[in-house]
Image (cartoon, rainbow, N blue to C red):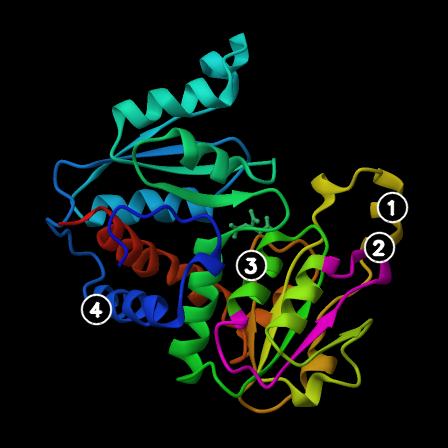
Amino acid sequence: MFKGRDVISILDFSRSDLKTLFDTARYFEEFKGRVFDYLRGRILALAFFEPSTRTRLSFEVAMKRLGGEVVHLGEIKRTSIAKGESLADTIVMLSNYADAIVIRHRLEGAAKFAAEIADVPVINGGDGSQHHPTQAMIDLYTIWRELGKIDGLTVGVIGDLKYGRAACSFIYGLTLFDIEKIYLVSPLILRVRPEVKDYLKKSEIKFEEKEGLEDIIEELDVLYVTRIQKERFPDPSEYEKVKGSYIVTPEILSKSKKNLIVLHPLPRVYEIPYEIDKLPCAKYFIQAKYGVPVRMALLKLIMGE
Ligand code: NCD
């Protein structure tokens, strides 16, 4: 089911695939700190053409905890790419050296392009503004672990829905479940792309666009917050217009359901003030922690015997 597969979009996976993934991740959660033998002798190449903390480190930790090893492309300015080597040639090389590749790239479609070239599985660690499938797996896993289910929930996604690939992949991922309703909350210029809306319609998921949380906070079971993706704005003056335009305050959260959980793929900038961290609803660091067992599960299922 998973063996040898590329991971390009969360929509490449079925609900039953996610069940297998989640059960495997749940198993690994019980053994924090243990090193397994599942991927002994295997090598994962990490090719990050954009900054990353969690995705890069949790893939590395996951691989090492499975008994495998990691090679890094490292800082791009120290590679042959700085001499003009193409992405295609770089991927051919990595595919010859390693047993699987994780790629992160600024360009949409870069992971699919790499997968077409490589002879080994390619995992998309985030490309462009739409796809970050392993983040969506972690987000859905967090909901399942913290609330015990995903079906029937009302979910608010707030922030940069236009350029944020974590938000976009999460929204796509929700379509695999029987979601009660999705609220898409953003400033007007950062509304979700038409193709995402079309997909929601096609999937017959109830959704509504909003500019603020005030009149919907009481309905939410999950609030997924994302930062404004400053680096993806073609025009910096557009960023200035929306900068700081929404902040999840304790006041707004005081109107929520008792069991609301607040998620964020991180990094946060200002959209969740530090004072929220101590509230029981704040689950974003636990979400980041789940990155390791979920990526262990994915690597074992794809690369293992
Ligand atoms: C995200 C990304 O790179 O898309 N980071 C992550 O993997 N958690 C989110 C972001 O940068 O805002």
Q: Which quarter of the figure has residue 224?
A: bottom right
Q: Nearer the viewer, residue 262 or 98?
A: 98
For the residues marked 4 and 2, what is the alpha-carbon distance in whole angstroms? 42 Å
Which percent across, then down, holds residue 198?
Answer: 69, 65
Classify residue 93 as left or right of residue 77.
Answer: left
> Is ligand 1 less than 8 Å from the beta carbon at label 3?
no
Q: Which residues are magenta?
A: 174-194
Q: Give the mark nearest the N terminus, 2 or 3.
A: 3
Which percent across, then down, holds residue 65?
Answer: 21, 49
Asked if marks 4 and 1 touch (Cβ < 8 Å), the reply is no
Residue identifier under label 1: 238
Residue at x-position 40% and y-position 49%: 7
Residue identifier under label 3: 169
Residue identifier under label 2: 242
Q: Is residue 85 above or below residue 87?
A: above
**Does any portion of residue 275 appear in the rendered image?**
no
For the residues marked 1 and 3, what is the alpha-carbon distance in whole angstroms? 24 Å
Q: Nearer the viewer, residue 55 or 137?
A: 137
Q: Which quarter of the figure has residue 1?
A: bottom left
Residue identifier under label 4: 27
Q: Which amino acid type corresponds to the residue marked 1 in the rendered image?
A: Glu
Q: Which amino acid type corresponds to the residue marked 4 in the rendered image?
A: Tyr
Q: Which quarter of the figure has residue 207?
A: bottom right
Classify residue 92 as left or right of residue 240.
Answer: left
Q: Is residue 129 above or below residue 101?
A: below
Q: Which amino acid type corresponds to the residue marked 3 in the rendered image?
A: Ser
Q: Which amino acid type corresponds to the residue marked 2 in the rendered image?
A: Val
